[in-house]
Amino acid sequence: MVTPEELHSEKVPKNLIPHPTFKGNRPSLSLLLPTLSAYEVGQLLSIYEHRIAVQGFLWGINSFDQWGVELGKSLASQVRKQLHGTRMEVKPVEGFNHITSSSLFCTLWLVSSAFPFHYQLR
């Protein structure tokens, strides 16, 4: 998580500080599917794209702003590193809030049933 204080210490201009920060406590959705074919991925992408565009229109916000995209990439990279570290290097799941840790645990548990590996959770 990037805080305004960290951005200020990195000499980010004041008018840009609100954009790459993430306060947390926002709703999210995780879908764990037993199979994932090109058809299911297409359906998921289509419904998410539609949902995001319509919500942005109704709320009067730019759903596709670049700051949110960059923040999402950064957060996804952290999760990806954690999943890789847990699966390949037997590192514990840590550094995330309770909800994210629980989601990672469920993901790892489901993957382990199809692709066994050793992992630790704290």
Image (cartoon, rainbow, N blue to C red):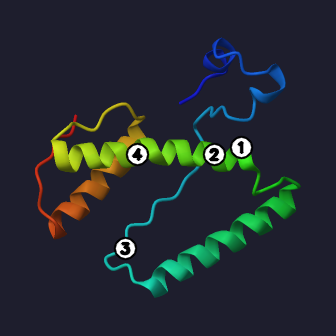
The kind of secondary structure element at disc 1 is helix
Q: Nearer the viewer, mark 1 or mark 3?
A: 1
The reply to whether dot 3 and dot 4 touch (C-beta < 8 Å) is: no
Gap between marks 2 and 1 measured at Cα = 5 Å
The reply to whether dot 2 and dot 1 touch (C-beta < 8 Å) is: yes
- Who comes first in sequence, dot 3 or dot 4? 3
Question: For the C terminus, which image quadrant?
Answer: top left
Residue 4 percent location from the top left of the image: 67, 21
Q: Which residue is mark 3?
A: 33
Q: Is residue 17 above or below residue 68?
A: above
- Amino acid at circle 1: Trp
Residue 18 percent location from the top left of the image: 75, 30
What residue lies at 84% left-to-right and 56% top-to-bottom?
A: 59
The kind of secondary structure element at disc 3 is loop
Gap between marks 3 and 2 measured at Cα = 26 Å
Q: Which residue is mark 4?
A: 79
Residue 10 percent location from the top left of the image: 64, 17
Q: Quadrant of residue 9?
A: top right
How dense is the environment of label 3, judged by Cα within 10 Å: few (below 14), some, or many (20 and up)? few
Gap between marks 3 and 4 measured at Cα = 18 Å
> Which residue is outermost to the bottom?
39
- Amino acid at circle 2: Glu
Q: Nearer the viewer, mark 3 or mark 4?
A: 4
Q: Is residue 110 above or below residue 27?
A: below
